Image: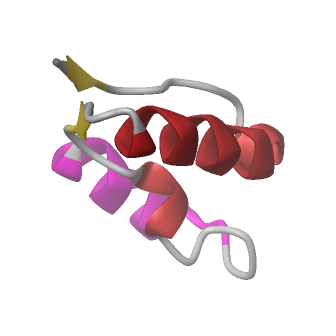
């Protein structure tokens, strides 16, 4: 089964935790937006890139 988790940026730690749980249960994550470096540098170009990748 495949999954994608959408959430607000400030919830990225919870999203990572849930994704890890699902991956360990055999699910496939389609895109991990939490792997982006948005925490340090949230700007319009980065947000555009993340949106295009999703």
Asked whether 27 or 52 is in front, the reply is 27
Residue lying at the far top of the rendered structure? 1
Question: In terms of image quadrants, where is residue 10?
Answer: top right
Q: Magenta residues, as a range?
A: 42-53
Asked whether 47 or 27 is in front, the reply is 27
Horizontal side, residue 18 vs residue 32: left or right:
right
| Residue 37: percent from left, percent from top | 56, 78
Horizontal side, residue 2 vs residue 31: left or right:
left
| Residue 20: percent from left, percent from top | 52, 48
| Residue 25: percent from left, percent from top | 38, 33
Horizontal side, residue 5 vs residue 13: left or right:
left
Q: Residue at x 79, y 39 (%)?
A: 11
Asked whether 12 or 2 is in front, the reply is 2
Q: Residue at x 41, y 67 (%)?
A: 45
Residue lying at the far front of the rendered structure? 25
Q: Main secondary structure of the magenta part?
A: helix
Please name the colour scheme applied to the rendered image. secondary structure
| Residue 50: percent from left, percent from top | 35, 54
Q: Residue at x 47, y 68 (%)?
A: 35
Quarter of the image that includes the N terminus: top left
Q: Is residue 11 magenta?
A: no
How many marks can you see? 0
Q: Is residue 51 magenta?
A: yes
Q: Residue at x 66, y 67 (%)?
A: 42
Quarter of the image that includes the C terminus: top left
Horizontal side, residue 38 vs residue 1: left or right:
right
């Amino acid at each position: 089964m495949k999954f994608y988790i959408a959430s607000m940026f400030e919830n990225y730690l919870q999203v990572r935790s849930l994704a890890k749980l699902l991956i360990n249960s055999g699910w496939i994550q389609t895109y991990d937006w939490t792997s982006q470096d948005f925490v340090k540098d949230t700007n319009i170009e980065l947000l555009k890139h993340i949106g295009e990748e999703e």
